Image (cartoon, grey):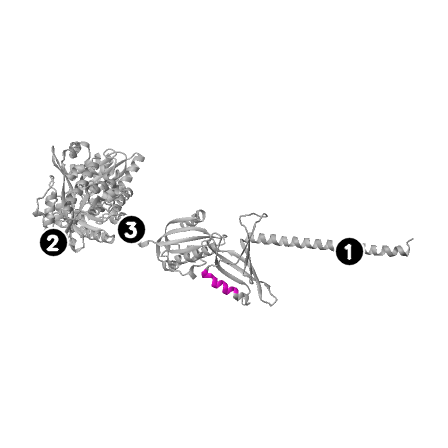
Amino acid sequence: MVLPAELHVIAPLALAAALGLVLLVVWSRRQRAEKRHIRQIREREERLKLALWASSEQYWDYDLRTGHMHRMWVDTRSVAPELRVLTMTESDHRIHPDDRTVVEDRMRRHLRGETELFLSEHRVLDSHGEWLWVRARGRVVELGADGRARRVAGTARDITRIRQAERERRIAIAVLHSMNEAVAVLDRDFNFVSINPAFTRTTGYTEREVLGHGANLLDSTRHDVVFYGKVRQKLANEGHWTGEMWQRRKNGQEFLCQVESNATEGITGEQRLYVVVIADITQQKRAEQELRYLANFDTLTNLPNRAMLSERLSRAIVRARRQNHHIAVLFLDLDRFKDINDSLGHTAGDRILRATAMRLQDTVGEQQTVARLGGDEFTVVLENLSDASQADHVAREIIMAFEAPLVLDDRQEVVISPSIGISLYPDHGQVPTELLKQADTAMYQAKAAGRRTFVRYDDSMDVANRRRAQLSGALHKVLDRGELRLVFQPRLSLAAQRITGVEALLRWTSEEYGEIPPNLFIPLAEESGLILGIGEWVLREACRTLRQWHDAGMTSLNVAVNVSVVQLLRGDFSEIVRRVLADTGLPPHALELEVTESVLMANAEQAAAKLQALREMGVSLAIDDFGTGYSSLAYLKRLPITTLKIDKTFITDLNRDPDDTAITTTVITMAHSLGLTVVAEGVESETQMRFLDHFRCDEIQGHWLSRPVPPADCLAFIRAWVPGTTSGAAGNVVPDAPADGSAGGSTDNPASPAGRA
């Protein structure tokens, strides 16, 4: 039993205990609340870190009272969940001087409440000292007691790459709109998405007319649907297609174009796009076809010329070698054509040649090649022969076909017969030049046998073979014996009426055989490889002679030296030229190297590279004997040449032969359009000179001016030259005619490649 006195003591103790329990409960709850609050803060910090890390953005907090900027960002090199937070506090905001005024103005407008957010794109200096573009956005987050903003916070993002991409996009758009080529962007279904102004100029379609429509809007009837389907399928599969195709304009006109198509991903990466560049090449192709025709076909008869014949014969040999068949080359010459031509006139002669071409092609069939080599010489190539008798049979048919008169355009009838020489592959030759040569030899035997017949080649015909062997042996001794010499033929500028230079021509006087024509020994030198040593001697002697003339005061002269295909394509010819120029002291611009058309076509790509090396040295380059039918006119623009020399065969009949006149004037115009100097070879009369002067031919050389003469005589002739002379000065010097009776100059050219050295 508790006494009242004891109750008096226990009651306070119980109250204290209860109070303590209450305080403990309150403290415990407060602790849990604080822990929960701390955990929430940490979770928010983690989420902020993740957000900053994932977005690559930066958090910033700007204290308006102190001007301090607090920055926080996550190191992008760290990996979640171990993210490393970087912070920085700065008072120098490092804003680009050109952007600071704009940034401050936008901040003031936001602080005044004029804008809901502070937004700015400007440049800042990074830790590496480089200016970066950033996009900053934020708002006021703390106000003072006076209601004025104290703190502004927000985020910033590096947009340097975005700005660069945008700049590149603007540049691309500007370039696209300035391009001459039509450009279209197509979607994955090949519907138009975008076009440039050149597309409208090329096709006639405006942007409104094509957007959303398929690319087949431009399809031409010259290709079938399958062709366009294959092109688009290849583009879809491989992501690229380039080539030529016909397209159709809005007005229905069809044009040939060069198309370059490439696939690319869309801006979002979700849709594939195709960029198509279209260049109208209709006129270019037409011009190329015209040039190709002039280069490969005879304009009088429309038959292949020598260049095309050589190409077709080469291909025929390849096929025959593969299939083990024979080929026959029939070389035809019209009997006494010159007499008929002189009596009836050149116009009638041209009609006879055209009628002859048609008669030949009708006789042998369209599947066989019939070519005109020049004059009244024609060639027929017969393929897929099992034995030689088939060639004899065709030759007999041709002779019988010409027993019927040729009916000319004016109903006039002319009876003419051919003499035919036959060579066979592989019996008589392995290459086109051999087969043509042997057939030509056999043709002369047919003429010697009385004309209007055919003869098949055999080795006994070519008595000259023994002569060639003898000359080849003697040729090995020419340098040691000092049997070579140079003669020089002046070259006259028609506009300035002054001698601008000379051409060096090689002569050989043998102890055993006397004077040997260049057209005999130059091919032998090429075949034996002796042309390398001989050619270097010619080059050195020509440069040495001109250097002496320069020292004598004739510093405006240059010298032209012919180059053989063997010289050009074997060894380091450019190094030889460089060494000779250095040894003789002749400046490179005073030397002109002449190469024949056949040199270029023997190995066009390699020859072009060799010529380029010489041109870079400063040496001038000329195509010699242009127009003889070996090379492609279209190839001229790809060669680093400076001069075009028109062959004598076109100069001889100027004003008499319409073809020669037309070809000569065309070549002059074409050469001038390419920036080339034109030199006419073999000018032998004042009439020819005046014709060439009228049609703006730059320079001439030939007997009207001077024959090729020894160095001293040539120098004396140049010093004595009077500008405006109305007749050739060849009589003022002693001519140095070769032993074969040719007069020098252009006539020194043999029929074989690289005829002069």
Q: State whether residue 404 appears in this view.
A: no
Quick one: SS at disc 2? Answer: loop
The circle drawn on residue 723 is 2
Q: Alpha-carbon neighbours of circle 3 within 10 Å: few (<14), some, or many (≥20)? A: some
| Magenta-colored stretch includes residue 105 | yes
> Nearer the viewer's eye, disc 2 or disc 3?
2
Left or right, 94 with respect to 340, comes to right
Q: Which residue type does callout 3 highlight?
A: Glu
In the rendering, at what x and y percent does residue 466 appear? 16, 31
Q: Which residue type does callout 2 highlight?
A: Pro
**Residue bearing the label numbered 3:** 288
**Residue bearing the label numbered 1:** 22
Q: Which residue type does callout 1 highlight?
A: Val
Viewer-nearest residue: 496 or 268: 496
Q: Upstream in the sequence, badge 3 or badge 1?
A: 1
In the rendering, at what x and y percent does residue 302 appear? 24, 48
Q: Quadrant of the C terminus?
A: top left
Q: Upstream in the sequence, badge 1 or badge 2?
A: 1
Viewer-nearest residue: 56 or 364: 56
CA–CA distance between discs 3 and 1? 107 Å
Quick one: SS at disc 3? Answer: helix
Q: State whether residue 57 appears in this view.
A: yes
Quadrant of the image occupied by residue 572: top left
Left or right, 72 with respect to 215, comes to right
Quadrant of the image occupied by residue 754: top left
Mark 3 and 1 residues: CB-CB less than 8 Å, in contact? no
- Please state the extent of the stretch shown in magenta in the rendering: 97-107
The circle drawn on residue 278 is none
- Asked if 467 appears above or below 582 in the picture, the reply is above
- Residue at the right extreme? 1
Q: How many marks?
A: 3
